Image: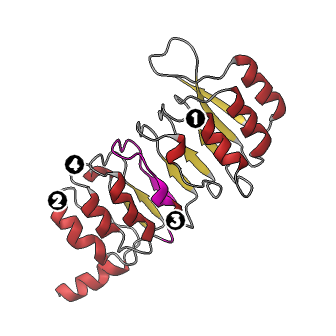
Amino acid sequence: MRRAALASLALCTHLRLPATLGKADLVTQLPRLRGMTDLDLSSFFRVVNNEVLAAIAEASALTRLSLQWCDKITTAGLADLGRLRNLRVLSLHSVHGIDDLSALAALPALQDLDLSWCHRVRSQSLPNMHRLRRLMLHGCELVDDSLCTALCTGPGVAELEELDMAFTQLGDHGLLLLATHCPELRRLVVAEQGANIWRTGMWTEEGMQAFERQRPDVRVQRVC
């Protein structure tokens, strides 16, 4: 019976894990999820750490992975995620202990990356992002126009369709680069400038108006 249950587990593509599982349970069970394609561990944020990431890397069929709020993860643990060759969507939303994302360059299928509120992430810590279709940097206040420079002036043509730069240091030069070098961009999120306790950006209204004139095909969304 146990062998049959484990065989069935290995064939699952989507699974809601019991919230009562601890770290040891995850480390034991996750490597058995060979057929799993979609995994959300955000409800296990209290126990998910680098050891759990090493176990996740055994689930080689994964295409979507959410580690939102899993704040015990560090930069060193990200190296194991590089083994997920099929991973297309990754959320590291509010994982505050990461600052170097170069390990993610080993993910050839990655198209959607959420780094919202990762406060230690800098523009220089991001690997080649040309393959990304969606990049969320909401609240990454150390990210500045050099991210746009790396994205738009490196090898290849940027495939980015959606970019969230709200509450970063995005400036007019970054807007110009995005307008000129991101032909696929269709949605840009920025922070509303005004009475706001967070850094809203370095761009000016004149710079934004110039962007909108040059790229009327891009929907600019201002958030508070």
**Which residue type does callout 2 highlight?**
Gly
Q: Earlier in the sequence, mark 1 or mark 2?
A: 2
Tell me which segment is drawn in magenta. Answer: 85-104
The residue at which mark 4 appears reads as 46
Q: Are marks 3 and 4 in contact (CB under 8 Å)?
A: no
**How many residues crowd around disc 1 within 10 Å: few (fewer than 14), some, or many (20 or more)?**
many
Q: Position of residue 216 (x, y in %)?
A: 81, 34
What's the residue at 29%, 75% (across, down)?
31
The residue at which mark 3 appears reads as 107
Residue 22 — which label? 2
Q: Are marks 1 and 3 in contact (CB under 8 Å)?
A: no
What's the residue at 44%, 66% (across, down)?
82
Left or right position of 14 against 21: right
Furthest residue in direction right, as rendered: 214
Q: Position of residue 1 (x, y in %)?
A: 17, 88
Name the element at disc 4: loop
Residue 165 — which label? 1
